Image: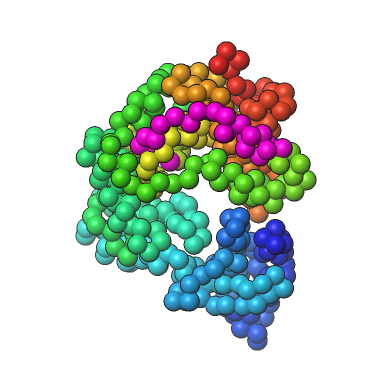
Amino acid sequence: MEIHQLAFLQSDAVHPLITEAFLGKDMPPSEVTMEAVQHRPGAGATGIYRVTAHEDLYVGVTTEHVHDRAEGILRSDSERGKLVLWQHPMDPMLPGLQLATDPSSVTSTWGEGYELTALQTVSYRPLRRAVIAADFADGRRLYLKVLREGHAGELAARHRMLLGADVPAPAPVRDPIRDVVALEQGRGISLAEHFLADGAAAVRPAEFVELLDALPAAVMGLPTRDAWTDRLSAYASAAVSAVPQCERRVRRLEEEVLAGVPVTDRGPLVPTHGDFYEANLLMDGNKISCLLDVDSLGPGYRVDDLACFLGHLAVLPAVDSRYLHAPAAFDRFARVFAAGVDPESLRIRTAAVALSLVAGARDVRGGEWRAKAEHRLRCAEVLLGLTRSAGDLPHWPAVL
């Protein structure tokens, strides 16, 4: 049913519902363009649309359940079931988004007397979270993380926990306000830039293992989060919805992973980051300078953190063809990472992460994303030995 809902949200059939809800029946027809789509198997699908009227407005439409006390929403019936609609930034599950996207409010709340010079949305996952970059005239850049109700305090506490253990992480500038955590800008450049330049040739893979070793014991008191393989069936379903012509291949990968996971060693429960990959690691020269996005910090398994890192590294050429050095970097990092965990467990879980990234290639504004999604699928197949490697696809080191 969700696949049909997703198709409906991506069709023109939803456009009249949007214009009627926000412009009224008597207004002239307006142009509606889908800007993004998000599918969460088991929860529903969400689309973001730009409506061109007298001035552009952005509208969210979701098939997900939204609680009745949410403000600023409209409800509508459609051929694919009930819909919830809202006008950005009045996201019904992110009450702080209005604060974080309003220049005058950002200036008065976090400006410390300085003028706001830029305000930009870095990322937005409807109904889940948003990150807004705010630049001020004194040279500061803050990242405003907008979370669901009740989660901001938990995130700020995670950052303080890491800083207290001398693990480099962005510092909260003050207590959260309306479920918005304001964080200082981390020092350094993304590890992805090193992979792009030369495959991070001068960076020690062991340093990333050492960083995980430095996570404080207090992390074990946080809630446990499912890892990638724990949610594999949902990710496989999302991949099928993105590239339905590849369903047989996706299901074979799913079966291979589910068969292999129980017969490999996951290792002991330890402190984990939960989303450990190049985009969440900043480097100062060849040294790690900051660990980002610690929302999933908690008890878990080292092999899952390392598989997350390798799975994202494996698909980098499927994200951008300029990552020419990614396969060589993958080989070097995989050899080091496999020394501390069960290599077969790491290989299977790395393939599972690559599979989980297939649906993330979906981009409603361009037609090339399907090729990128299939490229990510081939990465997972190569890692599991289901197809032969090519020059731009990493393979598992034979000696492991």
Q: Vertical placement of 232 versus 270: above or below?
A: below
Of 378 and 251, the residue lying toward us? 251
Taking the image as shown, residue 39 lies to the left or right of residue 297, namely right
Count of numbered tags: 0
Residue at x-position 55% and y-position 16%: 400
Query: Is 59 in the magenta?
Result: no
Left or right, 319 with reference to 144: right
- Name the residue rendered at 59%, 36% in the picture: 352
Screen quadrant of the N terminus: bottom right
Residue 14, given in percent of the width and then of the height, sits at: 68, 70
Whether residue 135 is visible to the viewer of this picture, yes or no, is: no
Tell me the quarter of the picture where residue 120 sits: bottom left
Magenta span covers which residues? Answer: 252-274
The percent position of residue 246, horizontal first and vertical second, equals 75, 42
* Residue 5 in the image, given as x and y percentages of width and height: 68, 63
Q: Is residue 263 magenta?
A: yes
Q: Position of residue 186 (x, y in %)?
A: 33, 40
State the colouring used for the structure image.
rainbow
* Residue lying at 29% horizontally and 51% vertically, measured from the top left: 156
